[in-house]
Image (tube, rainbow, N blue to C red):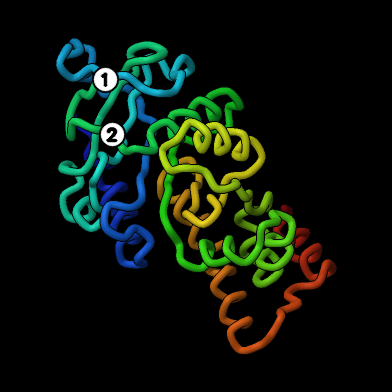
Amino acid sequence: MIALLEETREFRRVAEVLFIKSWAEASAGNMSLRLAAPPLLDKLRPDPDKIQESSVDMTDLIGDCFLVTASGSRMREIAAEPEKGLCLIQIIDSERFWIIDGSEKLSSEWATHAGLHSLFKENRSGEQAVVHCHPLNLIALSHIFNSEKEINERIFRLQPETRLFVPEMLGLIPYAVTGSKILAKASKEKLKKYRLALWDKHGVIASGKNLSQALDRIEIVEKAAALYMQLKSIGLEPEGLSDKQITETLRAFKK
């Protein structure tokens, strides 16, 4: 990749965690990171053979560069050799991007990633990274509950870290076909409020100022989901922290 050593290292580190935790089986999972334009890019011109069209409007992203996981790439392979599983792209106009370096085909979820990066620029949130993966316990919860309020009431009382690190809690997105415009639109709408959302019976999508922060949010909420599932497995319906305990915790950390 063109002078992107630190960025590819971050993809490697996060991909290794996703693989070890079994949150990205086979070619599941995808990631993207918005970049400052590499200095050498000024000397390059788009190769017509590497210009591709997107199914989503990219007007807000014109000129921006991204590192994106390639279609069919495996996290276990990205952890070993990230350059072989990533694409470096630049957005040319509202419909087209060019692949500067790397694989010839982006993740099938690029429509969702592009929509979210547009959102981050619109609301000036500073978020620049998106991670999608398949945490077991959160997916299991989507088979149990179909209410966003109910899921949050259950799992965001089980440990203080969830409220501290993910104060807006978890969004729930109704089932939609992977890679579809419907899923991309629903994800963009949901992440106007949340920084972590659960795709019903599928997986999670999370944002962060970098990939590691997005992963932090997934890990913390997945741990709460695992606590809930473990307690339920021995016949308990956990009450969790009281309103008073939550308020005291948030006040102590000035949240």
The part of the image, by quadrant, that contains residue 114 is top left
Q: Secondary structure at mark 1?
A: strand
Q: Regarding mark 2 in the picture, which secondary structure is present there? A: loop
Image coordinates of residue 82 in percent, x first then y, are 20, 46
Residue at 52% of width from left, 43% of height from top? 176
Left/right of residue 5 with respect to residue 226 in the rendered view: left
**The N terminus appears in which quarter of the rendering?**
top left
- Is residue 128 in sight in this rendering? yes
- Indicate the amino acid at tag 1: Gln
Q: Is residue 164 left or right of residue 111?
A: right
Give the residue pinned by disc 2: 106
Viewer-side residue, 40 vs 97: 97
Q: Is residue 43 visible?
A: no
How many badges with numbers are in the image? 2
Q: Where in the figure is residue 72, as x and y percent of width and height?
A: 24, 45
Instruction: Measuring from the top left, give residue 46's x and y in whole percent.
Output: 20, 12
Task: Identify the residue at the far bottom of this view.
Answer: 234
Which of 152 and 126 lies nearest the eye of the viewer? 152
Residue 207's place in the image compared with 114, above or below, is: below
Within 10 Å of disc 2 (Cα), the crowding (few <14, some 14-19, many 20+) is many
Residue 249, compared with residue 200, is above or below; it is: below
Q: Residue at x 33, y 24 (%)?
A: 65
Disc 2 and disc 1 in contact, CB within 8 angstroms: yes
Q: Quadrant of residue 2?
A: top left
Mark 1 is surrounded, within 10 Å at the Cα level, by few (under 14), some (14 to 19) or many (20 or more) other residues, namely some
Mark sitting on residue 197: none
C-alpha distance separating marks 2 and 1: 10 Å
**Disc 1 marks which residue?**
52
Of the image marks 2 and 1, the number of the one nearer the N terminus: 1
